Amino acid sequence: MGKSSGCCKDTPGFIVNRVARPFYGESLRILEEGIADVATIDWALKSIGGFKMGPFELMDLIGNDINYTVTETVWTQLYFDPRYRPSLIQKKMKEAGRLGRKSGRGYYEYGESAVIPTPNDNPVLGEYIFTRVISMLINEATDALYLKIASRDELDLAMTKGVNYPKGLLKWADEIGIKVILSTLDGLHKEYGEDRYRASIFMRKMAIDNLKFYS
């Protein structure tokens, strides 16, 4: 399970950018739908998921122009797969010059007079947000393994060391339960009817055979 053929690997940077897209993309989708605001989504992923920064805090730090460009590049290079489609919110933030910390305003306000928004710390809402985002991230890592883009250990190391995730995504999948992740993705796919939420065939096979990424 931990081996890859080595024939079709992307660069480490592209692997990280590809696998990490749902951290931003699914969080933006939740925001677009009005399920939760920026502060609440960031709170959920930090307090429940253990991420050091929420997606909107991180986008503001990176720069919303840079994050949008990376998202668009990944989407284009992967032949416009709907899983990587940029959010219109990202585009509008870039066009409005709300680039984040470097411009003094992004998803949050910066400066001495900035008001820190209060999140809705409802645990049920928080768990929903976290489960939805982590399921999409794990699905992306699973597909990358299936397509031999990188090995199991390379993928988990890339996410823990490359972008400082609290755990490797494949190890996280074993902890949560692959069947739980698959059920979440299938539920989203049924609800939205979008190819964006298609589960990796590798994950489906693993769930049928009761396999884990780590023995």
Image (cartoon, rainbow, N blue to C red):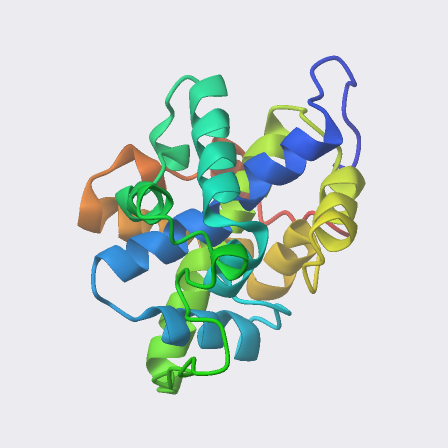
- Residue 43 seen in the current view: yes
Q: Is residue 33 left or right of residue 143?
A: left
Identified at 35% across, 34% down, the residue is 85
Q: Is residue 178 above or below residue 3?
A: below
Residue 207 in view of the camera: no
Query: Splitting the image into 4 quarters, where does residue 94 fall?
Result: top left
Q: Residue at x 70, y 61 (%)?
A: 167
**Image quadrant where one finds the N terminus:** top right
Residue 21 lies, in percent from the top left, at 50, 43
Compared with 13, 89 (above or below) is below
Q: Residue furthest front?
A: 112
Q: Is residue 27 placed above or below 36 in the rendered structure?
A: above
Q: How many marks?
A: 0
Residue 165: where, in percent of width, then height? Answer: 67, 59
Q: Nearer the viewer, residue 6 or 211?
A: 6
Residue placed most toward the observer, 198 or 11: 11
Q: Position of residue 12 (x, y in %)?
A: 74, 32
Compare residues 204 and 168 and report the one nearer the observer: 168
| Image point (50%, 82%), residue name | 112
Most foreground residue, 178 or 110? 110
Coordinates of residue 63 in the picture (x, y in percent): 52, 49
